[in-house]
Amino acid sequence: MKPLFSEAGLHRLDEIVQPGLLCVFDFDGTLSPIVTQPERARLPAGVLQRLVDLSNHAPVAIITGRSVTDIRPRLGFVPDFLVGNHGLEGVPGWEPRGERYTEICRDWEEALSAALRDQARFDPGIRLENKGYSLSVHYRLTRDRSRAETQLAELFASLMPAARVVAGKCVFSLLPQDAADKGSAFEQLMQISGARSAIYVGDDVTDEDVFRLRRPDLLSVRIERSADTAAEFYLHHRFDIVQLLDDLLRRLREQQIKTATSPLSANGA
C-alpha cells in the first residue's frame, strides 16, 4: 500500500483519470469528519464546493452506510448517483428488494430493543438506528466499549433470520445475509453509467467490498494507512481529500481543454 501522492500513485491517476471517469466516495470519515453524534454530520464547505465543481466535469456517486433519506440533506448538492445502506438502497433497478429488507430490519429492531431494555446488563449508551434496509447499532457513548462489543456480538448471534454483521468505528451494521454490498453496488453503477474507469475513496470496513474488487479500471483509495486493507493507495488524513479533489479537477479541466483545442475538434469531426 502506497501513498496516493507518490510516483506510483500519480502514475495510476494518469491511467484512471480519462474521459468516462466515474468518481465514487464514501461519506462519513471520507468526505465528512466522524462526529460523536452522527445526526450532526455535514459536508465541510470546502469539500462541498469542490464536489459541485467536480460534478460539472464527471459523474459523481456517493455510496454510504446512511439511508438515502438521511444522507440527502447533508450533502448540499445532488450527485449523479446516491446509494445508501451500504449499497442496498438507491441503486437503479434494485428497488423490489427493499420491502423484504425493511421487514427483516423491523424484526431485528424489535428483538434488540426488547433485550436492551435490561439496563442492568446493557449500557444505556447503546443506540439503535433503523435505516430501513439495514440496522446500525452504535456504542460510541458506552462506558466500556470492549464489554459492549462482546455483549452485542452475543446478542446478534440470537437474531432470526441471521444477520450479516459488519463492524465499523464504534458501530455494528446488521444487513440481510443475501443483501448487496458496496462492491456489488459499485459494479452496478459502473454498468449503468457506462464508465470506462473509476476512482473510489473510503475509510471503513464496508469499503473493503469495493477495494477487494481489484479491477484494473478502478483506482481504490483508503483514508489513512492500514495494514489490513485491499485498497491500492492511501491518503494520510481525511483532510487530504481536498487535495485529491483539486487534483481530479485539474486533470479533468486539462483534458477538456485538450479536447476543445484538438485538430479533430476544430474541424468539427
Image (spheres, rainbow, N blue to C red):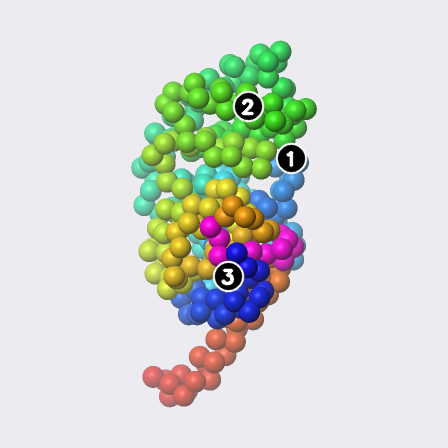
> Percent from the top left, x then y, of residue 135?
48, 30
Q: Earlier in the sequence, mark 2 or mark 3?
A: 3
Mark number, residue 55:
3
- The residue type indicated by label 1 comes to Gln
Q: Earlier in the sequence, mark 1 or mark 2?
A: 1
Q: Residue furthest right?
A: 143
Q: Nearer the viewer, mark 3 or mark 1?
A: 1
In depth, the one of 103 and 203 nearer the eye is: 203
Q: Quadrant of the C terminus?
A: bottom left
Quarter of the figure with residue 101: top left
Residue 208 belongs to magenta span: no
Residue 236 belongs to magenta span: yes
> Percent from the top left, x then y, of residue 16?
45, 66
| Residue where numbered disc 1 is placed | 37
> Percent from the top left, x then y, of residue 152?
53, 23
- The residue type indicated by label 3 comes to Ser
Give the vertical position of 128 relative to 49 (above or below): above
> Percent from the top left, x then y, of residue 112?
49, 19
User: Mark 3 and mark 1: span between their CA atoms?
Assistant: 29 Å
| Residue where numbered disc 2 is placed | 150
Query: Of helix, strand and loop, which one carries label 3?
Result: helix
Give the vertical position of 228 relative to 58 (above or below): above
What crowding class fits label 2: few (fewer than 14 Cα within 10 Å), some (14-19), or many (20 or more)? few
What crowding class fits label 3: few (fewer than 14 Cα within 10 Å), some (14-19), or many (20 or more)? some
Give the extent of the magenta segment.
Answer: 230-240
How many numbered markers are drawn?
Answer: 3
Quarter of the figure with residue 100: top left
